[in-house]
Image (spheres, coloured by chain):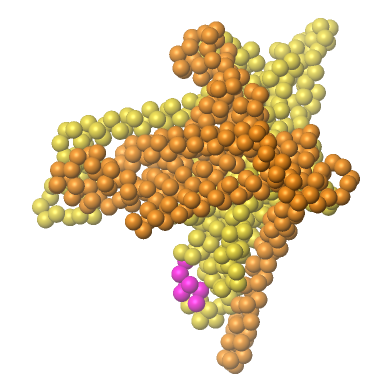
Amino acid sequence: MSETTNGESVGWQPSAPVNYSTRVDKVGTSARTARGIRIVLAFVLAGVMLIPVFWLGLTSFKSRADAIAVPPKVVNFTPTLEGFVNLLSDRSVLNARRLELMKERTDLTWYEEIALKNGQQITGISQYVGRLRNSVIIAGTSTILAVILGLLAAYSFSRFKVPGESDWLFFILSTRMLPPVVVTIPIFLMYRQLGLHDTHLGLILLYTVFNLSLTVWLLKGFLDEIPREYEEAAMVDGYTRLQAFRKVVLPQAVTGIAATTVFSLIFAWNEYAFALMLTTERARTAPPTIPTILGRGGVEWSAIAAGSLGFLIPVVIVTFVLRRHLLRGVTFGAIRQ
Amino acid sequence: MTAFPADSTGRQGQRQISDRAIKWIFITPTLILLILLNIFPLFYSLYLSFTDFSAITKDPPVWVGFANFGKLLNDPQMWKYFATTGRFAFLSVGLQTLIGFGMALILREKFNGSGIVTTLILIPMMLSPVVVGLFWKLIYNPSFGIFNYLLGYTSPVGAPDWLATGNLALWAVVITDVWMWSPFVMLLCLSGLNAIPDYLYEAAAIDRASSWFQFRRITLPQVMPLLLIAVLFRTIEAFKSFDLVMGMTGGGPGDATELVAVNLYRMAFQGQWRTGQASALAYIVLIVIIAISNVYIRNLNKIREG
């Protein structure tokens, strides 16, 4: 305990070595008890915040019946991948005779076995797989575009005088200020005219513009932090502006670019409203699809939970990777740590 | 560059031109995309808001002046949706501010594992709101949801059905929104708290100031600017709220959770296709958001100066 409290006063070196806190308000037992209570509270808090995610995870490994058991089952159920199989496959119900035939077969894969337990036969890959693929294509492409375009624009805004700079920067941000429906009404009419409704290209373009608000603002912040003198020195040494940009600025901005990319990816990956209103079938992404996953005769909660969990896991991982940049990312670079 | 030596004035001129060119080459694609997919659509829908256009008919838009705005502002139902949205925004932003600030106070001092704990708490705000809405629907389910059990109801008989009861449904949405976004307020408050210099507290402790006095005179004023930014961000988001409600209630039961953004969607797309009127409503929402932001920013500046 004395070590940790002492650790807080690093940077201030008293003449005689002390092994107690040098902060007058951090001594005595009551301060220490308060600290202990805080730590316990912090863990309790994290636990409470994670209950819903934990519950989602549990539900995704339950069978259809266990998922809707009353009272809810927390530990007393057998984990199964039924939810995931049902999410990813189309199935048909077998009649009694064909069920017998299927049961005699020995060449069934594990997922066919799971379906068979419910008297079903897998007939193909479900719609959801295609929607998930759309999500990957659209989020990925729009992120790459938004980061490249945003990086170039941010460099211009950061290093040169652009006429009407603050107006542009404001307009860039305005897509985010408005309810999605406001943006969508005119876009919908435009896309219908241009034949871009329900196409990958249409959604990619819109997400790119949507994400440009984030990438331009974030990257401008990161680039502003790189001293101009670096490029100027390089240019005095004979580099052209482009070479200086590529060989001096870019390596310095790598962390910022990576963080921006991931934020932009999360936004595109999570986006629901535009996809709901601008796509119907071919280009529809996963978020508007997940609420419509229905089983035979009622909501299939384990499949929905499986879909949600699979959808959330990448985001959770990314949150951990990005934790140092979170503040900047969620405030569009307005606040830097 | 070694290929262009010697004549230094020529090189200088070349670089001048190329800087200008680079500036515009770098910025033009972004500006074109913005004009096409952001600025033009905004003006287009401003025009549409003065017409009776419907996206499913072949009729061209007919200019109707302020009729759409008049109709919307005279519709008591519309005022009700705005009131619901205002209540939702007030309740959820208020609770988020309190809880987020509280969490930041708990987490401000580093301990072993505090980084991990903080990140775990931040997870909800990174998730997709529609998916969050959906799995909270499972949690709120009156018979097999876990929410009522955690509240102490041991059987579904007599336990509240959160999403199907008029008064409770909005609270259910508020609770979910608070769960999702308190971490956001916490994150901003933490950065504010970490920036407070230690010597302020030491001086206060030497003067034997009570902890309440320290909180009121040091902590609160120092964190206030960031707290207000958090509140501003969250209020704007609350007025935009769409995904979460769509995932949880779809505006129901009845119109208990029918927020303006949800109603806007219904008016513009679902069945009604009143494009002109929806555009007018969109602009009313826009004006409300801008007005709120201005009030906040003015207060924020006042606090910064004072």
Our reading of the magenta stretch's main secondary structure is: helix
Q: Quadrant of residue A42?
A: top left
Q: Nearer the viewer, residue A152 or B175?
A: B175
Residue, x 57% and y 24% (percent of image)?
Answer: B169
Q: Classify the position of the N terminus of chain A by image quarter.
A: top left
On screen, residue A223 above or below B166: below
Residue, x 48% and y 12% (percent of image)?
Answer: B153
Q: Quadrant of residue A267?
A: top right
Q: Horizontal and vertical percent for residue B215?
A: 27, 42
On screen, residue A295 above or below A320: above
Q: Horizontal and vertical percent for residue B289?
A: 57, 47
Q: Nearer the viewer, residue B235 or B255?
A: B255
Q: Is residue B114 left or right of residue A93?
A: left
Q: Tell me, what hue is chain A? A: yellow
Q: How many marks?
A: 0
Q: Horizontal and vertical percent for residue A28?
A: 15, 36
Q: Quadrant of residue B13?
A: bottom right
Q: Tell me, what hue is chain B? A: orange
Res A283 visible: no
Residue, x 56% and y 73% (percent of image)?
Answer: A160
Q: Horizontal and vertical percent for residue A138?
A: 70, 46
Q: Which portion, as a residue range, is magenta?
A: A226-232
Res B28 visible: yes
Q: Is residue B45 left or right of residue A230?
A: right
Q: Is residue B46 left or right of residue B233?
A: right
Q: Nearer the viewer, residue B276 or A12?
A: B276
Q: Nearer the viewer, residue A259 or B134?
A: B134
On screen, residue A331 above or below B77: below
Determine if the magenta segment contains residue B239.
no
On screen, residue A71 above or below B127: above
